[in-house]
Image (tube, grey):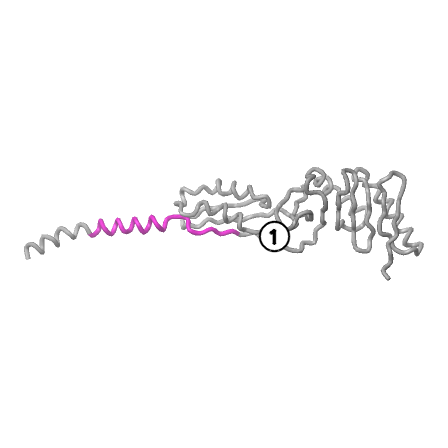
Amino acid sequence: MTRGGRWTKLALPAVPLLAALAGVGVVGHAWEVRTVEVEGVRLFDPAPVRKALEEALGRPPVAASASALREKVLAIPWVEDAQVSVELSGAVRCLVRERTPAALLADGNPPQLLDATGRVLGPARGSEPLVSLVGFAPYPEERQLALALLPRLAEAWGKPVRLCQRLAARDLAVSFGEEDPLVLLDPQRPEALVRAKQVLAAWEASGQGKLARVDVRVPGKVFCERREESQ
């Protein structure tokens, strides 16, 4: 009994120490970033945001910098702003504000969404009712100028532009609807669109059918091409 009692006395002080060590192991395993949550993404694929934030996984929350994670998220082209928080519970939360698409760059497959400045945001995921830009992929500066010109063209014609195609550095072809002709113009002389509309109205009033093209690239002249009627 003496030997048994001696072992009992020696073992008892070790119980709290073992429990403490076990607790440290459990807490250490739990006190790390385990989840990533992304909110606010509607138009784009949230995968790049998740990938940027997942760098914090497995780290203690105090070692995961919310500001550094935010900078990585802001580097994604379609992200305009982001709020990132790292919680002691082990969760990283991110609220994203997307950039607003203004046009569709239709040169590639898939087509790419553009903002109002011509910045490529990312692939289009649906059938957004946006103006299509064709031929502008290698010309970002001209793309930016064309996008800035579109509201003025829409106001002059009375309809939003549906298609804007680059024919050359100073040649654009714009379309406003299926029933409207294609209008060829010089982007440095957008006021010529008013003359094109006047000619179209006079042509239609004459009962000569529909026009397929109206060319106002040459100052003081308007060239018209009649639409071939389907049989």
Most foreground residue, 192 or 228: 228
Please identify the dominant SS of the magenta region: helix
Q: Residues within 10 Å of mark 1 (few under 14, many from 20)?
A: some
Q: Give the residue drawn at x 82%, y 39%.
A: 189
Most foreground residue, 215 or 90: 215
| Left or right side of 229 for 59 | left
x and y, in percent, of residue 6 in the image: 9, 52
Q: Give the residue drawn at x 82%, y 55%.
A: 179
Quadrant position of the N terminus in the picture: bottom left
Q: Is residue 89 magenta?
A: no
Q: Visible in this render: residue 57? A: yes
Q: SS class of the residue under badge 1?
A: loop
| Left or right side of 8 for 34 | right
Q: Give the residue drawn at x 60%, y 46%.
A: 78
- Direction bottom: furthest residue: 231
Quadrant position of the C terminus in the picture: bottom right
Q: Visible in this render: residue 103? A: no
Report the residue marked by disc 1: 43
- Direction right: furthest residue: 206
x and y, in percent, of residue 63 in the image: 41, 42
Q: Is residue 34 magenta?
A: yes
| Left or right side of 193 for 5 | left
Q: Amino acid at mark 1?
A: Leu
Most foreground residue, 167 or 145: 167
Q: Which residues are magenta?
A: 15-38
Picture layout, residue 91 above or below residue 67? below
The mark tally for this picture is 1
